[in-house]
């Protein structure tokens, strides 16, 4: 968010210095799965007011348009990929199951406002796909190759005369030590420790990164696992109801292995699927 905001400020003619304790490739953003999921857990159901929905839709459409300008750029920062949704139960049932698993915390959902931005999904009948489950849908989704995306943003920022200074802020009073008169605060999850802002809530679980397989040129989302194949590796992710507000950042090999095993169950050998 900080780097993107800096670029937008530069485009408006402002000189920008970024102060951050981590470089982009060390920041939390470097660990994102990398899918275009603009309304995913962005706010609580109570926060989803009509005014916020309208603002969200505008921001979503603006950023969508902007990301299209990065298609075909060397390093493939942004691309469109097939995404298969697979399930052992009908998708309507799966949706209800997921909603029930959200627990007492309900998220605002805005996807219907921008349905016309992306191609719709098509159902694939059994026998027309190689997956070991009866319900399969194929859609096309936008994916970010995070390493390359971050580098391009960084190069653009430096080319516009930007400066990045490594600096850690320990309290809000440290902001006053900066020579600049205007500050955009974008410490993300770091705002919890820095400002005691507990409204920033961790919502994601463990990721496993498998070595890249360029021939796997699609993404997949199952009942208990999702997979995004990027040029820097295959991201395998499990989701659990306990992910919400789980501040534990220690990698858990068992979770990662469970994700890979769940994926393996879906990927039946082709000779069995035919
Ligand atoms: C496992 C996982 C998967 C995800 N997948 C997706 C996805 O597929 N799609 C999607 O849209 N989103 C995804 N997200 C969410 C997304 O990654 C985050 O919302 C986003 O990266 C946050 O970016 P940010 O710039 O706000 O924060 P950060 O990337 O955390 O950047 C914060 C910056 O502030 C600096 N900073 C923090 N505290 C201080 C301090 N005290 N002093 C100085 N500097 C400080 C840091 O060094 C860093 O440079 C995922 C998140 C996780 C954890």
Image (cartoon, rainbow, N blue to C red):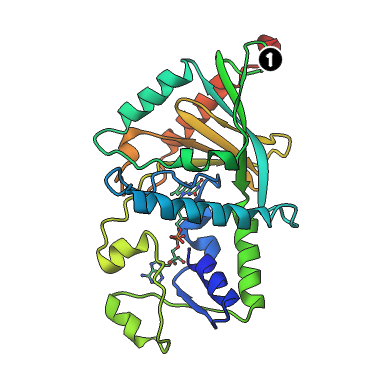
**Residue 108: x and y, percent?**
35, 42
Quadrant in the rendering for residue 93:
top left
Label 1 CB less than 8 angstroms from ligand 1: no
From where the camera sits, is residue 210 visible?
no
User: Is 95 on the left or on the right of 227, as rendered?
Assistant: left
**Residue 46: x and y, percent?**
26, 45
Q: Quadrant of the C terminus?
A: top right
- Ligand 1 quarter of the rendering: bottom left
**Residue 250: x and y, percent?**
38, 48
How many numbered discs? 1
Q: Residues within 10 Å of mark 1 (few under 14, many from 20)?
A: few
Q: Is residue 257 above or below residue 42?
A: above
Q: Classify mark 1: helix, strand or loop.
A: loop
Quadrant in the rendering for residue 137:
top right
Q: Residue at x 67, y 46 (%)?
A: 79
Quadrant in the rendering for residue 230:
top right
- Look at mark 1 in the image and give the residue it sits on: 128
Q: Is residue 137 above or below residue 12?
A: above
Extreme residue in the bottom direction? 179
From where the camera sits, is residue 190 visible?
yes
Q: Residue at x 44, y 71 (%)?
A: 21
Q: Is residue 121 above or below residue 274?
A: below
**Residue 243: x and y, percent?**
34, 40
Q: Residue at x 71, y 52 (%)?
A: 71
């Amino acid at each position: 968010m900080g780097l993107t905001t800096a670029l937008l400020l530069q485009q408006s003619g402002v000189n920008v210095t970024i102060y951050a304790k981590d470089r982009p490739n060390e920041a939390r953003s470097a660990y994102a799965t990398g899918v275009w999921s603009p309304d995913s857990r962005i706010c609580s159901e109570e926060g989803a007011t009509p005014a916020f929905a309208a603002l969200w839709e505008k921001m979503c459409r603006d950023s969508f348009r902007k990301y299209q300008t990065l298609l075909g750029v060397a390093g493939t920062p942004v691309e469109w990929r097939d995404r298969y949704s697979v399930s052992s139960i009908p998708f309507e049932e799966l949706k209800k199951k997921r909603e029930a698993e959200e627990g007492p915390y309900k998220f605002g959902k805005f996807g219907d406002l921008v349905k016309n931005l992306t191609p719709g999904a098509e159902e694939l009948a059994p026998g027309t796909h190689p997956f070991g489950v009866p319900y399969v849908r194929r859609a096309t989704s936008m994916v970010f190759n995070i390493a390359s995306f971050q580098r391009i943003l960084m190069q653009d920022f430096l080319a516009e005369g930007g400066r990045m200074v490594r600096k850690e802020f320990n309290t809000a009073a440290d902001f006053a030590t900066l020579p600049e008169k205007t500050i955009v605060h974008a410490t993300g999850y770091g705002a919890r420790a820095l400002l005691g802002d507990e409204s920033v809530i961790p919502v994601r679980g463990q990721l496993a990164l498998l070595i890249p397989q360029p021939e796997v040129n699609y993404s997949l989302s199952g009942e208990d696992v999702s997979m995004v194949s990027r040029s820097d590796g295959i991201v395998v992710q499990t989701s659990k109801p306990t992910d919400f507000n789980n501040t534990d950042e220690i990698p858990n090999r068992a979770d990662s292995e469970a994700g890979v095993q769940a994926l393996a169950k879906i990927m039946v050998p082709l000779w069995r699927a035919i």
